[in-house]
Structure formats: C-alpha cells, structure tokens
Image: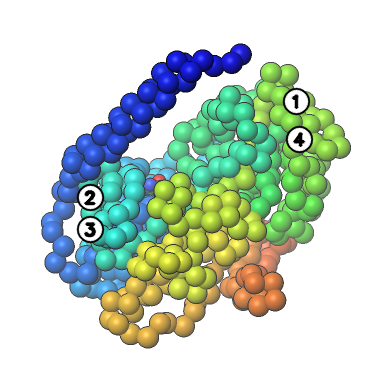
Amino acid sequence: MSISRRDALKLTGAATILAGTTLVAKEEQKKESFKAPIPPKTNPRIVVVGGGWSGLSVAKYSKKESSNADVILVEQRTQFISCPMSNLWLVDKVDLEYLTHDYLEAARENNYTFFNAAAIDVDKKNKILHTTNGDIEYDYLVLAPGIEYDYSCWTDDVVLERRLRQEYPAAFMPGSEHLTLKTKIKNFKGGNFIMTVPGGNYRCLPAPYERACMVADYFKHKKLDAKVILLDENNNVTIKEQGFLTAMRELYKDYLSYHPNSKIEEIDLDNKKVTTEFEEFEFEDASFYPYVRGGKILEVVGVAKDTVYNKLEGNIDYISYEAKGEKDIFISGDASPMGFSKSGNTSNTEGQYVAKIIANRIKKNLPIKWISPVTICFSAVSIYPEHAIFIHSEYAYDKKKNSFGFATPITSENWRGKDGLENAKGLYSWANSMFIDMFKK
Ligand SMILES: Cc1cc2nc3c(=O)[nH]c(=O)nc-3n(C[C@H](O)[C@H](O)[C@H](O)COP(=O)(O)OP(=O)(O)OC[C@H]3O[C@@H](n4cnc5c(N)ncnc54)[C@H](O)[C@@H]3O)c2cc1C
C-alpha cells in the first residue's frame, strides 16, 4: 500500500506535534523538578544509589572513612530482602523474617540518611541526582543498582518475555518473583520442574545449583514423583563443581537431572516444551533464569558498556571504580564489569574499597592501593540433614587476558559427614555476620 502526499503531510504534522509535546513535557518536567526533603549540603556529600549488598556497605563505610561527609543512601524499596539464604527459605528452612531487614535501622545505627526513592537520571554537569522524590546535589555519586534480566538471549518477542517474567520468573532479584517461585515449589504435584543456568557472568555462580539441590531434596522428602531438570548453558558446573556434581549423583539420582551444554533454542509455553540444540524437554512447571545485565540507571546516565560477559555493565576503571570520562561517579557491586563472582560478599568488600577511594579523594590524598574483593560463598547441598560446601578467594589481574581470576581459592567441597555439617554451620554464621555488618554499627 502506497502512502499519499496528504497522508504523509498529516503524519509529519502528527510527528511534529508529538515531538513538540515531548519537548513541552520535558520543559514542564524541568520546571516541576523539586528539591528532595533533606537538609541543604554543608559538607562533602556522598550519594549512593541502591541499597543492596554493595550500596549498604558503601554507605556505612563512607561514614566510617569520612566522618564529616554527609552520606545519603537512595533506595527504591522500603525494606531489604536478602537473596543469599533465600534458597533455604524456598524450602522452609528459614523464614522470611530472617531475610528481611530494616533500612531505617541501618541508617540510624550508622549515622547516614536513608532516602526512599528511585533514581531516574543524573545531571552530571551540575552534579544533581534526579529521583522520584526530588533532586539531590552530590559531590560523589556511587551507583550500585545490581542487575536486571536480559531476555534477549532467548527472544525478542515481548509477549513471550512478559509471560516468562510473570509466569516463570527467575527469582534472582528479591521480592514477588521469590514468592511466586515458592508457591510453585510448594504446590508442585509431580513431573518435570525446569530450572536454568545462564551463560555470561550471571548473579551468584553457585546459586542455581544450590537451588536445584534444595528443591530436589524437598521433592525427595515429600516422596513426590518429581524431578528438577537443570539446563545449564555452560559446559560444566561453573563453581564448586566437585561438590555439586557428587551431591547431584549421590543424593538426588531420581530427583535431579543435570544437563550441561544446554543452550535453550526455543521455549514453547503453550505446549510446555523447551528445545535445546540436542534435546527437547517437557515440563509441568519451571523457573527460567536468563542472562543478566547492569541496572537500567547505568544506561540512562550513560555509564554502561557491553563486556565480554554481559550487556550494559558499568563502564569503569577497574582499579578506581570511577566511571570512564565521568569524574566523581563510581559503580560498585554486581553492576561492575570486572568478571568477579557476582556475590554478596564480593559486593560488600567492593563497597568498602569504594568508600576508601572516595575518602581519599575527599582528603586529597594519593590514590589508594588496589584491594581485591573477597568472595566467600557457602552453598547448601542438602536440607535433610543440612550439609554445605564453600569457596573463599581473592582475585588477581591477568594482564594477558585483561581480566581477573581467582587468586587464592580455598574450597571445601566435601559435603558428607562432619565436614558438610561444619560447612552448614559456617553458612549461617557467614549470613549472620553479613547482616550485622550491613545493618548494625
Ligand atoms: C538465590 C540467590 C542466592 C545467593 N546466594 C549468595 C550467597 O550465598 N553468598 C553471596 O555472597 N551472594 C549470594 N547471592 C548474590 C547476591 O545476592 C548479589 O551478588 C548481591 O545482592 C549483589 O549486591 P548489589 O548491591 O550489587 O545488588 P543488589 O543487592 O541487587 O542491590 C541493588 C539495589 O539497588 C536498588 N536499585 C536499583 N536501581 C535503582 C534505582 N534506579 N533507584 C533506587 N534504587 C535502585 C535495588 O532495589 C536493590 O535494592 C545470591 C543471589 C541469589 C539470587
């Protein structure tokens, strides 16, 4: 069908009106922008976006390192729910209270301001953070927004994406997704329950394997005729391989079937079928974990780039954590691009280091020496009884590969007997100490 000149003119007119409307809307937005209800800035101000494992650590340690600074933590949620330990909550080993923590308490204990709002943009020239609850001036800005999902690894069809997000959520970001997944697990009557492990540097390398083991143990305990089908895009378990593979083989032979090299080619939700390069799987229920990318605010602010691992992670200098070409803006936690294990402990230690860098900048001292983040990661492999495995490592930079790798890994992958029980105790002590570190003085 051809389009007449008159139609074309009409369309151009419409486009002009639309463009005009957008401009007017932007002008009005500008006019309507308002100051956040916080006292005016009198000291150096550090504003942190994102109250997750990294942002909470940046806020607390910034106040410790720079006691005269005015520290503001901007978080869109009203309460903190932990992803670490949530796999145990899915199978009723801990309750929701154990995972839930109070932002106001963290701010009171550590003498900073908690500001409940979503960051929407940054005026980099004038050093102003725009939020849904008003504008905040900053001297130093830290973006720690964590991850978002990247469904483009499977589909460009937004209808399918919407169904995957809503009906089969990954539950790798805390909140409703976890509630949905828990209900699915509790109500599962039998058959195949598909879970997936994405490629790239996804959030928490061991968590999909830990979750598969937890759910398999739950099905086993309930004596269900049910199986977790774990489709892994990678060619092997990506971390603590020995521990997970032996547990899967010895404990869950009839309840868990692990498939490496299983990149998903098609998801047919109507017929409940998943196709990989080599096989087809039918399922009764599922939770699909896609690739991850950095939080959207990075892209909005113009400080995101594609990496060898994922799309749109923080575009920062690996040593100073400062955004390239953007002085005084830093990025920390899972949104950073270094290829570290995207874990809570890593994010916490990165947050402490970023707080030191900013303190040094305030004191106008020389740059500080690079401090490696620390990954300490316990994973439960069974709940009846509770057995776990763990890894502890710092990182080293490989100049040739231009990337970081584990430098000092210490692992305990024997989940059997006394070792496994001790590791399970370690899991709880680690989580308790991290909650204290983030929320108490
Ligand atoms: C099931 C599971 C198990 C895990 N187990 C472990 C474990 O055992 N050990 C371990 O060390 N790690 C574990 N992890 C990983 C750990 O949860 C993450 O690595 C960690 O949360 C990353 O911290 P972060 O601060 O970068 O991101 P997050 O903790 O996700 O925090 C980001 C915060 O930013 C906020 N935010 C985003 N955008 C905006 C905006 N525009 N404005 C305001 N706020 C915003 C979000 O609401 C969120 O609160 C696990 C993860 C999962 C999913």
The dot on residue 135 is 2
- Residues 77 and 128: in front is 128
Q: Quickly name the residue at label 4.
A: 265
Q: Amino acid at mark 4?
A: Glu
Q: Earlier in the sequence, mark 2 or mark 1?
A: 2
Q: Quickly name the residue at label 1.
A: 273
Q: Earlier in the sequence, mark 4 or mark 2?
A: 2
Q: Quadrant of the C terminus?
A: bottom left
Q: Amino acid at mark 3?
A: Glu
Q: Earlier in the sequence, mark 3 or mark 4?
A: 3
Label 4 within 8 A of ligand 1 by Cβ: no
Q: Earlier in the sequence, mark 1 or mark 4?
A: 4
Q: Amino acid at mark 2?
A: Asp
- Name the residue at the right extreme: 278
Q: In the image, is residue 373 above or below residue 273?
A: below
Left or right position of 88 against 195: left
